[in-house]
Image (tube, helix red, strand yellow):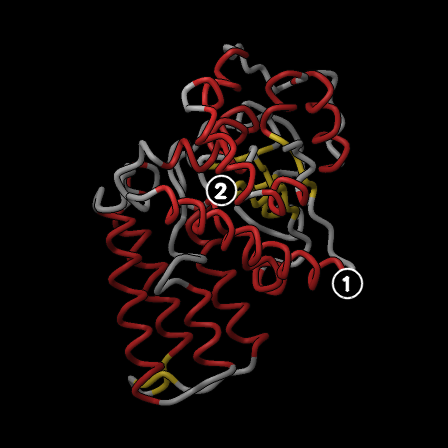
């Protein structure tokens, strides 16, 4: 259960950048809770809590606010009770009645006499936080023994494009950004059914992500926030060192190195070997800025 002693840990990245692999390893640590192979997409995805927050606090109109709450309810139920988003439903870990209780409590906070009313940022943040708190309170997760300070992990890939919202709703959260060589991300996207179909579209997809992340990160750090930036390739190659870095960042005292990849290091360069020299040059030329930002050579 989330409390003053339980913080959120958000892991984000461009997608196809290694967030799932890192999250799986982190959940092996006894001080980190989370839902294996499941993302709470109703926090920062389209129609999620972030849109409820903005429409109620910044651009309120009665019809818009009520419509957004209806859209959120549909998204919440889809993630909780179906596999519509390509993952197991949340009711694998939390009972149906508890999930519906959480939704109804949230709606009651948002509505007055059946209508969504304008609210202060702090009020909406509390309601959002209480919903996530409720979900973790009743989650059937592997028992973590001992008097520990738990982190609750969430890894919807693009969540760190909204890090200021997350820090407002979940004070004291920790943020880890995982990046992979942008050219490798473009190549990996070609195998995803949900990704853009053409090479230029995939390149622009990555460029747009990096631009948005740069802007959000700059604003967050100017306000005193901190994001731990990691490279997927270095995590895989030097897992012991990066276990230490992450433990230090999270202020977890442990003698265990909990990142154990057992990965085929040759796969890290498979994207490079699998394309022609002309394609490599095209990626170099079009992703030079993005590679430089994350310190990848071109």
Is residue 53 positioned above or below 213 on the image? Answer: below
Vertical side of 103 occupied by 30: above or below? above
Q: Residues within 10 Å of mark 2 (few under 14, many from 20)?
A: many
Residue 18 in view (yes/no): no
At horizontal 70% and vertical 41% (from top left) the residue drawn is 228
Q: Residues within 10 Å of mark 1 (few under 14, many from 20)?
A: few
Total numbered labels placed on residues in the image: 2
Q: Quadrant of residue 189?
A: top left
Q: Position of residue 288 (x, y in %)?
A: 61, 43
Give the alpha-carbon distance from disc 2 to disc 1, as whole Å. 24 Å
Circle 1 — which element? helix
Q: Position of residue 154 (x, y in %)?
A: 50, 43
Residue 253 vs residue 33: left or right?
A: right
- Looking at the image, is mark 2 or mark 1 nearer the viewer? 1
Sequence-earlier tag: 2 or 1: 2
Q: What residue is shown with label 1?
A: 222
Q: Is residue 190 left or right of residue 123?
A: left
Left or right, residue 125 beside residue 87: right
* Residue 120 sits above or below residue 209 on the image: below
Instruction: Identify which residue is drawn at 54% across, 56% down.
Output: 161
- Mark 2 element type: loop
> Is 292 placed above or below 78 here?
above
Image spot of residue 260 (x, y percent): 58, 15
Could you tell me which residue is drawn at 74 percent across and 24 percent down?
244
| Residue that numbered label 2 is attached to | 155
Residue 35 appears in which quarter of the rendering?
top left
On the rendered structure, is 149 left or right of 271? right
- The quarter of the displayed image where residue 86 is located: top left
Q: Quadrant of the C terminus?
A: top right
Asked whether residue 27 appears in the rendered view, the answer is yes
């Amino acid at each position: 259960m989330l409390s003053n002693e339980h913080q959120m840990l958000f892991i984000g990245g461009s997608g196809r950048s290694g967030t799932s692999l890192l999250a799986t390893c982190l959940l092996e640590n006894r001080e980190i809770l989370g839902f294996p192979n499941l993302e709470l997409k109703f926090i920062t995805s389209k129609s999620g809590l972030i849109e409820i927050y903005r429409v109620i606090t910044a651009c309120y109109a009665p019809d818009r606010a009520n419509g957004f709450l209806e859209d959120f309810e549909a998204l919440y139920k889809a993630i909780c009770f179906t596999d519509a988003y390509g993952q197991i439903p949340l009711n694998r870990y939390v009972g149906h009645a508890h999930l519906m209780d959480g939704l109804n409590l949230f709606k009651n906070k948002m509505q007055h006499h059946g209508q969504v009313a304008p609210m202060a940022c702090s009020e909406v943040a509390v309601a959002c936080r209480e919903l996530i708190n409720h979900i973790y309170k009743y989650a059937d997760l592997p028992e973590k023994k001992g008097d520990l300070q738990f982190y609750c992990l969430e890894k919807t890939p693009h969540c760190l494009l909204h890090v200021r919202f997350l820090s407002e709703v979940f004070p004291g959260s920790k943020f880890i950004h995982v990046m992979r060589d942008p050219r490798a991300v473009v190549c990996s996207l070609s195998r995803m059914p949900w990704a853009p179909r053409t090479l230029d579209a995939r390149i622009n997809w990555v460029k747009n992500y990096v631009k948005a992340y740069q802007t959000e990160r700059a604003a967050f750090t100017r306000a005193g926030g901190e994001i731990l930036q990691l490279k997927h390739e270095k995590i895989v190659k030097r897992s012991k060192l990066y276990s230490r870095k992450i433990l230090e960042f999270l202020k977890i005292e442990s003698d265990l190195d909990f990142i154990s990849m057992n990965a085929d290091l040759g796969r890290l360069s498979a994207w490079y070997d699998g394309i022609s020299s002309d394609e490599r040059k095209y990626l170099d030329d079009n992703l030079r800025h993005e590679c430089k930002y994350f310190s990848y050579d071109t």
